[in-house]
Image: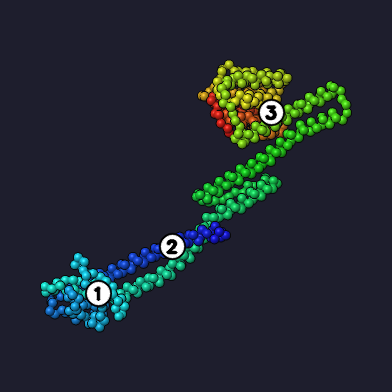
Amino acid sequence: MKRRSLRFRMMLLFCLVVGAFLLSTYAIVYSIFARELRAQLDRRLSEAAEPMVADLATNAPEEDVFRLDLPDEYLELLDAHGTPLNLSKNWREHPLDVGALDFPDGKPVFRTVQGVGGQFRMELIPFQLVNRSVVLAIAGPTRDVDIVLDNFRRVLIVLLPVSLLLIGVISGWFVGRSLSPIAELTKHAAELAQLVSDPRLVDRKIPQLVSHSEDELGHLAATFNELFARVVAVLQQLRQFVSNASHELRTPLSVLQGETELLLSERRSPEEYQKTLEVIHGELRHLSRIVEGLFTLSMADAGQLRIANDELYINEVLEEACEIAVPLGRAKGIRIDQNLEQEVASTGDESFLCDLFLVFLENAVKYSPPNTRIKVSLTRVNGSVLVRFEDQGIGISSEHLPHIFERFYRASGSDSVEARSGGLGLAIAQAIVTAHGGRIECQTAPGQGSTFTVMLPVQAPHVSVSSP
């Protein structure tokens, strides 16, 4: 049985259950039908006996009823001790055993007796005849009832296997149709497994499971369609991430390798050594930023990015970040205007918040033309802290705006968005803000600059969350 298909087992179980139900139903119907037929025969005997008892009570000496030759009515008159007093002709020819004369509560009794020609249904009626107790026995053959019941049994015997056959056909069709989404699911799961095993097929169209019902299987199909889409999206994102990470790491590694080989090729002056070491140091810092960023994002993806719940003033953290970014802006003649007069006490992770603010400050400096201004403001609105970074840079076009928080995302052209930490800055900022229970909004237009708004709750939750 374990080797049989699910469809076969469901059909077999369905047929067994319905077959048992039909068998019990037929048995109950047959029992009720047989009982009703016998009740009708008993009523006919009672209806025939009633005028006979009345006739005997009024015409006792003649007892004319026993002279009647009725083929389906057997009559016998007995005294209280069971001694026959009078018999009908057919009773005399085919005697019947009336049995014990026992009448509970003085009421007539019915019994089935065996005669020469088959079974008979008999009614025994006690009454008074000329001041003595007598019993009238009236009987009739049950052959008509037996014939009807026999025919009914034959019909049921034929009807039961026919019903089971129809049930098998209907259940096979119904089960097959009900399981078709599962069969289709198996097929598409195999296609998905092929997509996973062969990276070249990841860009293929995602298999869709189709179900025209709104039942549990319909919801199952919709759930697996969503699962297929997410798995393929994750595979595509992972492939893109690996490709971009490899590209980002290749450049500083190539520079390090080239500079090292250049140093080792021949003796250099101290100035050349110092210059080369400065280049190597810069590339190592760049690599460290990428590795630290990847570590932070991996912790966020695993739901293990722990945010401290320290008491702090957000305005002080923002001032510290601005002081770090001032030398970067001074090199390009960019001024950072701060509007941080309001003190905002809250809780959060000071280190992560400082890194968060530096991401937007460094991007603003990097993509702003020389001799411009960056405005930094801090306001408190309805229990939330709003930190705005407004620059006069190149802006971001609408087609690239939905992707700026993706890892290693770079748009082509002059409006390229490159986050700090080697293309991971905005992704890290998004993870930090999400961990603090906040969100980020961006208003921008090409050639008119960008405004990033960080919205944080005044009381940051102390939880670990996954990055979006």
Q: To which residue does mark 1 refer?
A: 99
Q: What element does badge 1 sit on?
A: loop
Q: To which residue does mark 2 refer?
A: 20
Callout in the foreground (1, 3): 1
| Residue 64 relative to residue 453: left or right | left
| Circle 1: residue type | Gly
| Circle 3: residue type | Arg
Q: What element does badge 3 sit on?
A: helix
| Residue 147 relative to residue 138: left or right | right
Q: To which residue does mark 3 refer?
A: 420
User: What percent of the width, then of the height, locates residue 133?
Assistant: 15, 72
Q: Residues within 10 Å of mark 1 (few under 14, many from 20)?
A: few
Give the CA distance from mark 3 to mark 2. 73 Å
Give the CA distance from mark 2 to mark 1. 40 Å
Q: Quadrant of residue 296?
A: top right
Looking at the image, which residue sits at the far bottom? Answer: 93
| Upstream in sequence: badge 1 or badge 3 | 1
Closest to the observer: 463 or 171? 463
Q: Residues within 10 Å of mark 2 (few under 14, many from 20)?
A: few
Can residue 289 be seen by looking at this rendering? yes
Can residue 52 be seen by looking at this rendering? no
Residue at the location (88% across, 26% down)? 267
| Upstream in sequence: badge 3 or badge 2 | 2
- Indicate whether 213 appears above or below 426: below
Q: Quadrant of residue 89?
A: bottom left
Residue at the location (24% across, 80% down)? 91
Q: Do labels 3 and 2 touch, CB within 8 Å?
A: no
